[in-house]
Amino acid sequence: MSEVRRPVAAGLFYPGHPELLRQSLDTLLRAHPTLGTRPRALVLPPGGQARAGAAIAAACSLLQAAAAPPNRVYLLATTPHRTAEGPAFSGKRQFATPLGRLTLDAAGIERLQDDAGGALDDRAHALEHRLEAPLPYLQRVLPPFQLVPVLLPEAGTTSAACGRILQLALEDRAGLLVVVDAPDGPLDRQLQVQARALGLDRQPAPSAPDHRREGPDAPLAHSFH
């Protein structure tokens, strides 16, 4: 059995060729200023580069000039592919994208599982694109980091386990929490509760001038500081 999760969204949600992917990401990221205050968490919209790329790049641009980049990234989303209760963790050693491989933080995954429960479910991770779609953006703006990917059943966003995972990720000053959800979606609402308890402020990601005319239905991203 392979110890690497292969990309399923490459060529669909973002360019599958490494050089084309780098060029498209750099074009999106150049539209945004680089700011020096690293957020504790990001909320990124689900979707491919054509629709959500500008919003994802806006949020990830906040990481480009960070004085202390994160050592690990906690990446959370819901999935219809997780039918059992509780969080789904991955037992793979690495997640691959066209830009290279990301090593999973096995110790971090074990800590979350020991504290919040859940189980290894690589089938759910193999089928789900929501965690994969933001990875190339993060790879482009950050130095090498370890990954802690977590999938939740769609009915599990109000669970104590979900709240605990969000809390632990926010409390990790060496880490960055990335939630893939629509603004004020169920995961975002849970994150807002945990962030308020820690005194963090929610802010919209900066918009590039070319993307401010997309209308009220345009995907949005937020950050927590």
Image (spheres, rainbow, N blue to C red):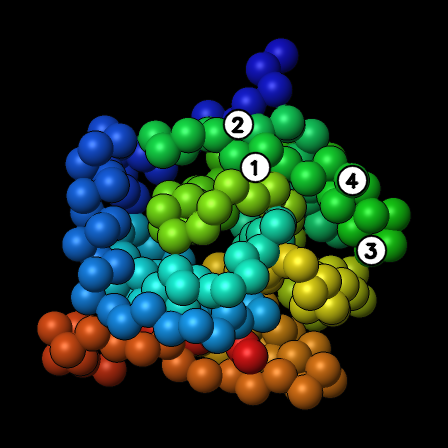
Identify residue for label 4. Answer: 107
Give the residue type at disc 3.
Ala
Query: First in sequence: mark 2 or mark 3?
Result: 2
Mark 2 residue crowding within 10 angstroms, few (<14) / some (14–19) / many (20+): many
What is the C-alpha distance between the residues marked 4 and 3? 14 Å
193 sits to left or right of 43: right
> In the image, which disc is placed on residue 125?
1
6 sits to left or right of 155: left
Q: Are marks 2 and 1 in contact (CB under 8 Å)?
A: yes
Q: Secondary structure at mark 3?
A: helix
Q: x and y percent of residue 11 in the render?
A: 25, 34
Identify residue for label 2. Answer: 5
**Residue 168: which quarter of the image?**
bottom right
Q: x and y percent of residue 38 in the render?
A: 51, 69
Query: First in sequence: mark 2 or mark 1?
Result: 2
Give the residue type at disc 4.
Ala
**Residue drawn at 62 percent across, 50 percent down:** 71
Q: Are marks 2 and 3 in contact (CB under 8 Å)?
A: no
What is the C-alpha distance between the residues marked 2 and 4? 18 Å
What is the C-alpha distance between the residues marked 2 and 3? 23 Å
Identify residue for label 3. Answer: 116
Q: Which is more foreground, mark 2 or mark 1?
A: 2
Judge whether residue 117 can be spotted in this image. Answer: no
Q: x and y percent of residue 176 in the render?
A: 59, 60
Judge whether residue 215 can be spotted in this image. Answer: yes
The correct choice, above or below, for 146 with respect to 46 in the image is above
Query: First in sequence: mark 1 or mark 3?
Result: 3
